[in-house]
Structure formats: structure tokens, C-alpha cells
Image (tube, helix red, strand yellow):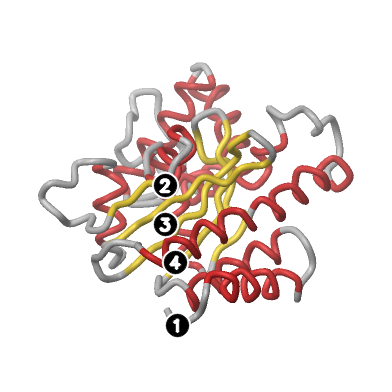
Amino acid sequence: MGLSIDAVREELDAAMSAVAPGIAAADELCAACVGLLEVDGAAVSMVYDGATRGTFGSSGAASRRLDEYQFTFGEGPCLDAVALGEVVHAADLDDPGEHRWPVFREAAIEDGVRGVFALPIMVTSVCVGALDLFRAAPGPLRGLHLAGARVAAELASSPLTTLITDLPRELPGEVSDPETWPDMDRIEVYQATGMLIAQLDVDADEALLRLRAHAVSTGQTASQVAWGILEGRLRLERDDHGGAGRGDR
């Protein structure tokens, strides 16, 4: 990378400033990361209470899907970055010595991703999400690329702060509760979970577990399974712990 770290900051900041605050700024930040940091994809994900709650910025559909995998499988570098409060490196997911996130790793490799790097995003002193960077080729993130990624993660706090501020004005009901607003981006999953609670006579944790298990076993994301349930194309049976349910694959 021929630019200085100050020049990288200026370009990232300029990309975000050229669009409206919030999700659009997060998308532009991710797109700029691809151009400046020699990565093939980027995503900004919200993480709350140990689970990803939404993709609030991405450089494209492929990066959004990779972030969705982490929600579906309940594992991945962004969750570790938030839990540890530090950068998580996976220079080669296909390395025989790489044993982290087995389900996520397999799905990412099938999507042509070999390197994944996650950096925590802080709002004041609280870690609220992660910046995920993806590479098709294996190799570490180092030097100015790593320094630039740290700057991008710092700047990513701005669109997340905007979302935190704006959600109570944009959504009806009592959404100011911090346990409520992070779930809005994947609300279809929680609506489908509610249907499963009634249909299967299980608690919320069991219902979400069954939805995720079905997603894993059928090669779908949790959101895809949720839409199948909500639209009546899929009905999970009481003894279905991940196999194909009636009316869907």
C-alpha cells in the first residue's frame, strides 16, 4: 500500500462523508476498505449478548452472506473479536492447524474465502460490533494494511452510533431498551422463532436452536429458513432437530 496511514484515514473518512450517515456510511466504509486494504470483502456487524444481531454495512452481497453465516452458526471471528476485545486473525482458514469455528470455516472456504480478520468496534468504552475483512487468498494482514484496518474499525463506530441514536425515532414501540434495538435487522428470525414456540411448544432458546440447526443441515442461512417459515413454505416438526421439514428442502 503506497499511501500513508494519514492518507488512508482521509480516504476512509471521505468515503463515509460523501453519503448519508448510518448504514449508507457503513457500506461506503466497507467498499473503501476493499480498495485500500487489499482485501476482497468487508462487513460491519453488530454483536450483542454474545450473538451477531445485524449486518449494518458491507461491501457487497458476498460479505453480507459471510456475516450472516456467523449469526446462523453462532461462531466466527467477529464474535471472538468482540468477546476478546482484540483483533482476530485467520490468515488461512484451510490451514490444517486452524481449528476455530469449524462450521463457519467450512462455509467460508466453500464461498472461496481463505483469510478472515475481525477487529472490535468500540462506542465509548463498550464493544458493540466488529469489522470483518475477507480475502480470497491466504496471507496475514500486517503493516499498513493492519494499521488501516484499525482506523476503519475506529471510524465504523460512527455509523453504529447513528443507528443507536436514530432507531427510537424510526421504529414504533418501546425500542429504546438496549436489549431490543440490536435485533431489528434480523427481525424475521425472531418472528419465525415466535411461530416455532407456539407450533412446537418449546421455549425461545430451543426454537432458535432448531431454526439454526435446520439452516446448517440444509445449507441455508437463518434468515432464509425464517422466511420459509413466515411464508408457510416450511414447517418444522416437533422431532425435527435440523433435517428437512415439510414443505421445503
Answer few, some or many: residues within 10 Å of disc 3's Cα (few below 14, many 20 plus, some between 14 and 19): many
- Picture quadrant of residue 146: bottom left
Mark found first going from the N terminus, 1 or 2: 1
Residue topped by disc 3:
66
Judge depth for marks 4 and 1 and give the one in front. 1
Judge depth for marks 1 and 3 and give the one in front. 1
Mark found first going from the N terminus, 4 or 2: 4
Q: How many marks?
A: 4
Does residue 219 appear left or right of residue 106 in this picture? right
Type of amino acid at the residue the image marks with label 4: Ala
Do the CB atoms of the residues marked 3 and 4 lie less than 8 Å apart? yes
Residue topped by disc 4:
62
Type of amino acid at the residue the image marks with label 2: Val
Does residue 157 appear left or right of residue 43 in this picture? right
Give the CA separation, mark 1 to mark 3.
29 Å
Q: Secondary structure at mark 2?
A: loop
At 76% from the left and 43% from the top, the residue drawn is 164
Q: Position of residue 247 (x, y in %)?
A: 42, 46
At 27% from the left and 50% from the top, the residue drawn is 105
Answer few, some or many: residues within 10 Å of disc 4's Cα (few below 14, many 20 plus, some between 14 and 19): some
Judge depth for marks 4 and 2 and give the one in front. 2
Judge depth for marks 3 and 2 and give the one in front. 2
Q: Position of residue 148 (x, y in %)?
A: 50, 65
Residue topped by disc 1:
2
- Picture quadrant of residue 244: top left
Residue topped by disc 2:
87
